[in-house]
Amino acid sequence: MNDEYQRLASTCCDNGMLEIVWQDGASSNFHPIWLRDNCRCEICGDPAIGYRNLRLTQLDLDCKPRSIETTSAMLSIVWDDGHRSQYPGSWLRSHAYDEALRAARVFVPRPWDRRFRSNPPGCEYADAVGDDAALLRVLQRVRDHGICFLRNAPAEPGIVEALARRFGFPQESNFGRVQDLRFDPGKRSIANDVKALKPHTDEPYRASPPGLLLFHCIANDQRGAGASLFMDGFELATRLRQHDAEGFAALCRNNQAFRRHFAGDVDLIAEFPVISIDEFGNLCGVRVNDRVAAPLSIPAGQIEVYYRGLRYLLGLAENESLMLRQTLQPGDIAIFDNHRVLHGRSDLTINGQRWLQWVQVERGDFHSSLRIFADRLGIERDANPLLRGAYGSALQT
Ligand SMILES: [Zn+2]
């Protein structure tokens, strides 16, 4: 970053706002209450660890600067109650909330294309577990593309849980902490059905669906069948948006109900949009799984356009040319973002063996590891929020 970008040239106080002009010619406006609320002095808190002593209820919403001093590196304010605040120019620039700067700070995903599908990102398992820099690259690929494959891990149970612990905590649910997907014709579950499993995201009926999923192949002698299928939910959503903007908007604006009842004492119901976007219209998550869709409760005027959009999206999710097809070999591990990437499986042959072990990691812990590994390696960390996930839309499109 060039120096002028974060060096202050001047300030002026006009219309109750503080305007800061930077040496590169750009300017940003700040409200006095925002500055006072974000005072970085030691009385007000410890910004290095994200701890605040300051309570908003102690502040006057109409607080005003009594005096303002600017050097090229620092803005200093004495407030009308005598409190003193200082703000480094670099901090102000990276937190300025002008519309364009806010838009530049959100995470903008790049959808997959044919080239990506023909050469998906991968890494040797031994490198990922033995070298923090290699593991960080794996996590960054999951951040940027939603998926990365590890090769040549030991084909033994327990490996994937230990891998998850390298960058998060395996999350326990009603399925347990480590789930075994074993093909066994005598035992019924969806994963054991011989027919293909359409690509979907997992557990959209939860308030917080699994963040990252890690699938580890321990056995697979399907002789070409039983391939894992992956699709970029953002590529599908982008194609829907291009094809039918109203149908896309209906899937962002309205909640889809999802439900799954498990015999015993678990009955999960959640209502969230199929497509989540941020306030700038960027994709930030999908919940695509019509096997667990529950009756819609949306405005009557939205029903037709909603079904039109959803049917098109689900049609795309059956389009084989958009699928990344990987026959996981014993020792292969797929790490993918369940709020972005759909997964499924092609037909199994009746006599074949197939054993996958999977765990899930919460996305906040994954994002934390991206920052912490970067810090440990002394490289630039992700300062900005990362992909938020399928938690609803900030913009009423
Ligand atoms: Zn203070």
Image (cartoon, helix red, strand yellow):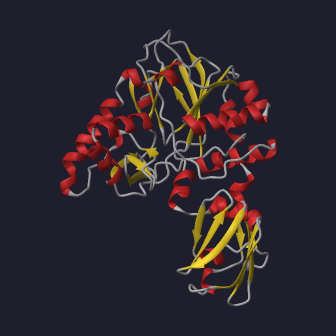
Q: Nearer the viewer, residue 7 or 223?
A: 7
Q: Is residue 18 visible?
A: yes
Residue 381, image x and y in percent?
71, 47
Q: Is residue 330 left or right of residue 224?
A: right
- Which residue extends farthest bottom? 81
Determine which quarter of the picture holds residue 140: top right
Q: Position of residue 149 (x, y in %)?
A: 61, 26
Q: Pick whichever, 26 or 324, lies toward us.
A: 26
Taking the image as shown, residue 143 lies to the left or right of residue 70, namely: left
Closer to the camera in the image, 103 or 374: 103
| Residue occupying the point 61% across, 80% down | 56
The residue that appears at 50% across and 48% down in the rendered structure is: 389
Residue 222, above or below 189: above
Examine the rendered structure and indicate whether residue 90 appears above or below residue 283.
Answer: below
Q: In x, y percent, where is residue 244?
A: 27, 40
Viewed as shown, does residue 136 lie left or right of 62? right
| Residue under the point 73% across and 30% down | 128
The quadrant in which residue 216 appears is top right
Quadrant for the C terminus, please: bottom left
45 horizontally vs 214: left or right: right
Residue that lies at the very extreme toward the top in this rendered image: 223
Ligand 1's image quarter is: bottom right
Q: Position of residue 309 (x, y in %)?
A: 27, 41
Q: Is residue 359 visible?
A: no
Up-down: is 95 above or below 17? Answer: above
Q: Using the image as rendered, state which of residue 249 and residue 94 is in the foreground.
A: 94
Q: How many marks?
A: 0
Does 297 sit above or below residue 147? below
Displayed quadrant of residue 127: top right
